[in-house]
Image (cartoon, rainbow, N blue to C red):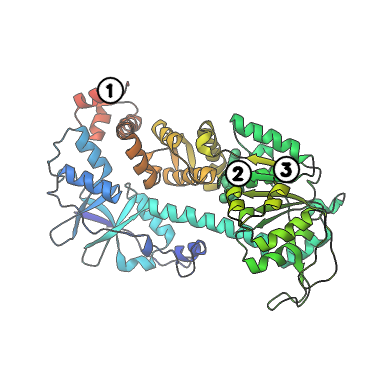
Amino acid sequence: MSCEEGLFAPMSYRYEERIHYGQGVGDKMTLHNMIQPISTFLRATDSLEDAARAMLETRLDVLPVGDDEGRLIGVFSRSSLYRMILEKAPAHSPIREFMKTEAVTTQLDKLSETTFEQMEQIIQNSHVGSSIIIDSDRRIVGVLTKARVVNALVESKNDLREQMEVMMQVEKPDLLDRSLDVGRIGDKAAVNHPYRAVYTWNHIITRDKAMKQCMSLAAKAARRLTPVLLLGESGTGKELFAHAVHNASNRASGPFITVNCASIPEHLLEAEFFGYEPGAFTGADRAGRIGKFELAHGGTLFLDEIGEMPRSLQAKLLRVLEGKDFFRVGGNRPIQTDVRIISATHAPLEDRIREKTFREDLYYRLHIITLTIPPLRQRKNDILLLANTFIKQLNPILDTNVTGIEEAVQKVLYHHDWPGNIRQLRNVVERGMIMAEQGKISFADLPEEMLQKATEIHGKTVVHAAEKMEIERALRETNGNKAKAARLLGISRSVFYEKLKKYNH
Ligand SMILES: Nc1ncnc2c1ncn2[C@@H]1O[C@H](COP(=O)(O)OP(=O)(O)OP(=O)(O)O)[C@@H](O)[C@H]1O
C-alpha cells in the first residue's frame, strides 16, 4: 500500500497559539486534543453491515482498516459505503474490494511540530476530509477530521468575538474616560464617540409577519423615551433590535452603552452601573471611574440579560428609572442622568417574580413597551433567506466561493429546531462554507449532530437525498455523461439508469 504522509517543517506561528484564546483556562485547543480516538477499527473481512454500523456509531465519514496487529492497511469511506449500497452488495459481503488502500496519515509524535496550516493542507489533500493518526509502528491511534478542526475554529472565533465585545465595553478605561466628554444630545462631537450602535432596521433580515409587526412597533417606540423590554430566546436578535431602536431614535448620535448583567460579578455590578470615587474599595482604580449610567448620558443604556440582575441592585436601578439621582460608590454627590433604557432577557420574568428573584415594581417599570421576538422555528420562511444572506456576506470574509445550499440540505435546515436560533444558523452556515469552500453546501458540510438528528427524524428521506446527491454530483463531475457517471460511482449502467428514473432525472 502507499500511505502518503504530510510534511512536517516547523513554522513559527502555530495553530495552538493562534486559537487558544477561545478556550477556558487550562483547556488549550491543540491538534492533539482534536483527535477522535478509535477504539475499534475495521478489518478487510468485515461486512458492509459492520462498516455501516461503525460509521453510524463513530459518526465518521472515513474509517481506518487495520490488520490483526492494528496496523493501518487502508481506509473505508462513506463513498465506498454508497458504492456498495448502489451496487446492491449483500449486507454480509466483505469490504475488502471496496476499501481504499491509499490513505493520508500523520504520525502522532510529529503532530506537535505540525502547524494548523499544514494540517489543513494535509486534510485537504486527502479528498476524504481526514487524516488517520498512527504511531511510529503504523498502529492506528485515531482520526483527525476537517469537521473537528473547523468546529474548533468557528467556536473559538465566536468566543473571541464575545470576549472582544466585553473588552470593548468593560476593560478599556481610556475609552471610558474619553467618552466622558461626549455623548450629549446636540453635541456634534458625539458622533465620533467610541460607543455607537452599529445596527439599523436594514440589518434585520426577515420576511416573517410577526417579526415585521415587532419591527413596526419598535420603530414607533423608538421615537419616544419610553423604556423598551425585549423578550425572546437566546440568539433571536434582541441585541440587533436594541441597536436599531437606538439608531432610529432622536438620540442616535448619543452613546449606546451595553451592560451584560449576567457577565459581571455581583459585587462589581453597582460600580459598573454607577461608577466609584477614588479609593472607594480595595483594588479599585485610584482615579475612580464613572459608571455606565453617566457614560450613557444623552443616549441609550442597553441592559442585556436583565433577568440575571441581583435583587439588591434592582431597587437602585428602579430609583434611577423613576428619575431620582444616584451616587457613585463611595461618593456623596448626587448625580442625575438622562438615559433611555432598553432591556432584554431570555428569562421568563413572570416566573422570576413569583420566585421573588425579580422585583415586580421594576418589571412594570421596564415592561411599558414589550416586544417578543419569535424564535427561528416559528418563522421557518426566514431560515433559507437568512442562510443565503449569510453566504453572500461571508464569502468575501472567508475567502470562499460558495454558491448556495443543496436542496436536500435546505430541507434539513428547514426542519431543524434551531434552539440557538439565528446565532446557531449563522454558525452552521459559516462552518458549512469553510467545509465546502466552493459550490453548494452539501450533507458532508453539516455538523454531525445535525445530520444524526435529521436521520433520526426523517430517516429514509435523508438517505434518499444523500443517494440523489451522490448521483447528481457524479453527473456534474462528468458533464452529464451517464456512462462515465456510472463508472465514477463504480456501479453498472443499468443500476445507474434505475436510480436516475427513481430521482426523475
Ligand atoms: N433578523 C436577523 N437578521 C440578520 N442577522 C440576525 C438577525 N437576528 C439575529 N441576527 C444575528 O444573530 C446573532 C445573534 O443575535 P443577537 O446577539 O442580537 O441575539 P440575542 O437575542 O441578543 O442573543 P442573546 O440573548 O444570547 O444575547 C448576531 O450575529 C446577529 O447579528
* Viewer-proximal residue among 429 and 290: 290
Residue, disc 3: 368
Element type at mark 2: loop
State the residue at coordinates (17%, 60%): 70
Give the left or right position of residue 49, taking residue 229 as reference: left
Dot 2 alpha-carbon crowd within 10 angstroms: few under 14, some 14 to 19, many 20 or more = some
Residue, disc 1: 502
Quarter occupied by the N terminus: bottom left
Element type at mark 3: loop
Foreground tag (3 vs 2): 3
Quarter occupied by the C terminus: top left
Give the left or right position of residue 161, taking residue 127 as reference: right
Instruction: Decide which of tag 1 and tag 2 comes sooner along the chain.
Output: 2
Q: In this rendering, is residue 386 above or below 58?
A: above
Give the left or right position of residue 243, taking residue 120 as reference: right
Instruction: Decide which of tag 1 and tag 3 comes sooner along the chain.
Output: 3
Residue 196 place in picture, x, y as percent: 73, 51
* Viewer-proximal residue among 494 and 365: 365
Instruction: Tell me the tag on residue 237.
Output: 2
Q: Amino acid at mark 3?
A: Ile
Dot 1 alpha-carbon crowd within 10 angstroms: few under 14, some 14 to 19, many 20 or more = few
Image-quadrant location for residue 95: top left
User: What separation in Å lies between label 1 and label 2 (alpha carbons)?
Assistant: 42 Å
The CB of the residue at mark 2 lies under 8 Å from ligand 1? yes
Label 3 close to label 2 by CB (< 8 Å):
no
